Amino acid sequence: MSENELSVRVDLAERSYPIRIGRGSSGFASFLASLVKGRLALLAHDSRLGVQAQNLSEQLIHAGWRVGTYAIPSGEASKSAQQLQSLWTALANLPADRSTAVIALGGGVVGDLAGFAAASFNRGLPLVMIPTTLLSMVDSSVGGKTGINLPEGKNLVGAFHQPSGVWIDLDHLATLPPREASSGLAEVVKYGVILDPSLLDTLEHHADYLRSNLAACPATAGLVARSCELKAAVVRDDERETTGLRAVLNYGHTFAHGFETVLGYGAWLHGEAVSAGMVCAAELAHRIGYMREDFRQRQTALLDRLGLPVRVPKGPVEPLLAVMRRDKKNLGGAMRFVLPQKPGKVELVGTVPEAEAAGVLADLMT
């Protein structure tokens, strides 16, 4: 590892793995070889990343690998049973054995879909993540959650399948459209609210720079590394959400999944939905006396400075509630929400009347 690279380790006993954070892909073949036994890989990539996929494939072939490629259409709609079937077919035609590596090059959609294919084909293949969006770098590439969407809701079918390693190349951030750059910052705000208030200070100090030039901002590498560290610590202590600790990572997501499902997958980027979801969760926490008004205002102001939604799309409330009733955090038919009390402290609350959530949605609609 060079002096310009950072490293984070996810400690999960025999399933532990490294996260490398740096710039460029020149060392990826060696990184991959250190993680898996075979020399056969399927490179599943976002269809917009054809040039990057070709360069990476050529690097691996030069290092002695046999590589198949599969392009996944961009967008949330690709997290589907149809695309999963196509990936299984690509693996079967390779043909893949149990040492074949699945490499996921792209954002959260590619990681979730290719990860589920790796989890399920031959009952489990090695998975290596190369996240190319800020959101996937700081969140979805770490922790082992994989899955697809159904018309009834987001991520309703999936599996826990930890990667063998995560390769984060910060140069990919220079290619992101402004919406995607801002979308990822929502998840960093989330980590600041739920676990580490110092992230909020950094985001506030660099907000304008992060919004205008995420890749060049001097704070970006540290924000990515710290976010990975925080998620790694939560995953270490509650890998499969059995104790409730990992549920804090879903702050804002109960509302967000409702927005994504009702609006149609892809109408809002995931981070945009999470931003509005955090605003709703904070408003709900404030109304029931959990959260002080000054902190609620601080969160909303920061999200707004980062170019993220702070209002809810106008429309009927009941379809949103119908999706929220199917949230995986719910217990015994009752909705449960991750609600903030103060910077760095949140709680999973199951005693909020549904009518309160409905009122928040109605009042925050644009």
Image (tube, rainbow, N blue to C red):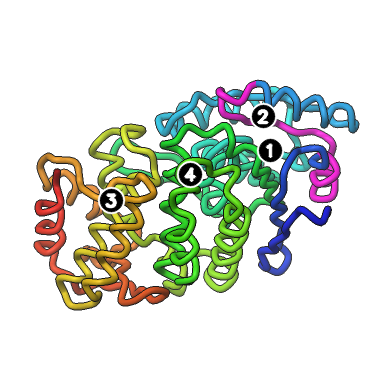
Q: Which residue is denoted by mark 1 in the rendering?
A: 102
Disc 3 target residue: 276
Q: Position of residue 84 (x, y in %)?
A: 52, 32
Structural crowding at the residue carrying mark 3, measured as other residues with C-alpha within 10 Å and reported as few (<14), some (14–19) or many (≥20) = many
Horizontal relation, residue 57 to residue 317: left or right: right
The reply to whether the C-beta atoms of the residues labelled 1 and 2 are less than 8 Å apart is yes
Q: How many marks?
A: 4
**Image coordinates for residue 18, horizontal then vertical, percent:** 72, 57
Q: Secondary structure at mark 2?
A: helix
User: Which type of secondary structure does the marked residue at label 3 adopt?
Assistant: helix
Q: Residues within 10 Å of mark 1 (few under 14, many from 20)?
A: many
The residue located at (72%, 22%) in the rendering is: 54
- Report the residue marked by disc 2: 91
| Circle on res. 147 | 4
Q: Give the position of the C terminus as an image quadrant.
A: top left
- Magenta-span inclusion, residue 81: no
Q: Where's residue 319, x and y in %?
A: 16, 43
The residue depicted at 30 percent of the width and 57 percent of the height is 301
Considering depth in this image, is 341 or 308 the residue closer to the camera?
Answer: 308
Tell me how far mark 4 sits from mark 2, CA to CA.
17 Å
The CA distance from mark 4 to mark 3 is 23 Å
The amino acid type found where label 4 is placed reads Gly
Which circle's residue, 2 or 3, is located before the other in the chain? 2
